[in-house]
Image (cartoon, helix red, strand yellow):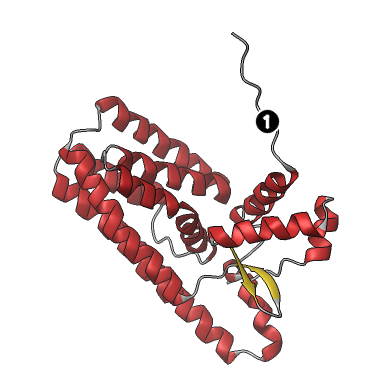
Amino acid sequence: MIKRLMRPPTLGRVVIDKVRESILHGELLPGTPLREVQLSNSLGVSRGTLREGVRQLCDEGLVEIIPHRGAFVTRLSRQKAKEIYTLRALLEPYAVRLAVEAQACEPQDLDSLEALLDRWGELEKEGNIYEILRAEIEFHGRICRGSGHQLLLEVLENLVCQTQLFVLHTKLYRTDLVSDTVSHRTILDAIRTGDPTAAEEAVRQHILDAGDRLISRIEGVDSQLCNNSPGSTSRLVGPAAD
């Protein structure tokens, strides 16, 4: 049988993927203006194509468009960060509870998650933020997948970009008090017990702790910016420089 042809990605899709990758790599920091002329020349595309890509990234929550000012890489406000982590703290623990209750995690699945954490540890040593982001999204996606609750999984899938933005900010603001592999191994250990309540609580506590630390850091940076001179507001784009 003749294999179905795979269509090459459109130019607009390539632009979206390239800018998204630059944001999630931390190359375009939160608050960075996306200058249309400069970016279109750099990418070798028309301004119209770039504009379409920016609108898509705006829908994903990675870019914000401010009237009369232009497009900027989204910088999480305290309110937005709180909305993301409190919603995750409600949905993800429930999905994990359902998965554990259904005994959906086979020994090989748990061993695979353990291997992911080992690889994650190497990524931390390398300081590879982009791959760490991917590992975190993969880990959370896999522990929820066994819930069998398709509508819940669809809602969580729609939150992926917002979650990536949230996790990226925890890296840039340096709010991880312990290694990611340590905090996530606590979740894995709880799942291994087969106790739905323990697994649910481990996930919830992990998300709430990460959210609280990020909010505290955002408030500290905002306070520092308010005390600085107007000319120093460029630090909005460089929280990791502290």
Q: Provide the residue designation for mark 1.
A: 7
Q: Quadrant of the C terminus?
A: bottom right
- Residue 222 coordinates in the image, percent (x, y): 52, 82
* 80 lies left or right of 65: left
Could you tell me residue 77's position as x and y percent? Answer: 49, 75
Residue at 19% across, 40% down: 100
86 to the left or right of 80: left
Residue in front for this viewpoint, 156 or 109: 156
Observer-nearest of 180 and 64? 64
Q: Residue 71's spot in the image, x, y percent? A: 68, 69
Where residue 233 sits: x, y (%)?
Answer: 66, 82
Q: Residue at x 83, y 55 (%)?
A: 46
Instruction: Decide if residue 127 is in sight here.
Output: no
Q: Which SS class for mark 1?
A: loop
Where residue 75 sits, quadrant-wise, is bottom right
Name the residue nearer the viewer: 131 or 3.
Answer: 3
Is 44 displayed left or right of 95 in the figure? Answer: right
Reply above or below: 39 against 1.
Answer: below
Q: What residue do we see at 54% from left, 63% from top?
A: 172
Figure label count: 1
Q: Amino acid at mark 1?
A: Arg
Question: For mark 1, does the 10 Å Cα neighbourhood hold few (<14), some (14 to 19), or many (20 or more) residues?
Answer: few
Q: Seen in the image, is 242 located left or right of residue 101? A: right
On screen, 113 above or below 151?
above
Q: Is residue 75 visible?
A: yes
The N terminus - image quarter: top right
Instruction: Write the residue at 29% across / 55% down.
Output: 91
As drawn, 47 above or below 13:
below
- Name the image quarter holding residue 27: bottom right
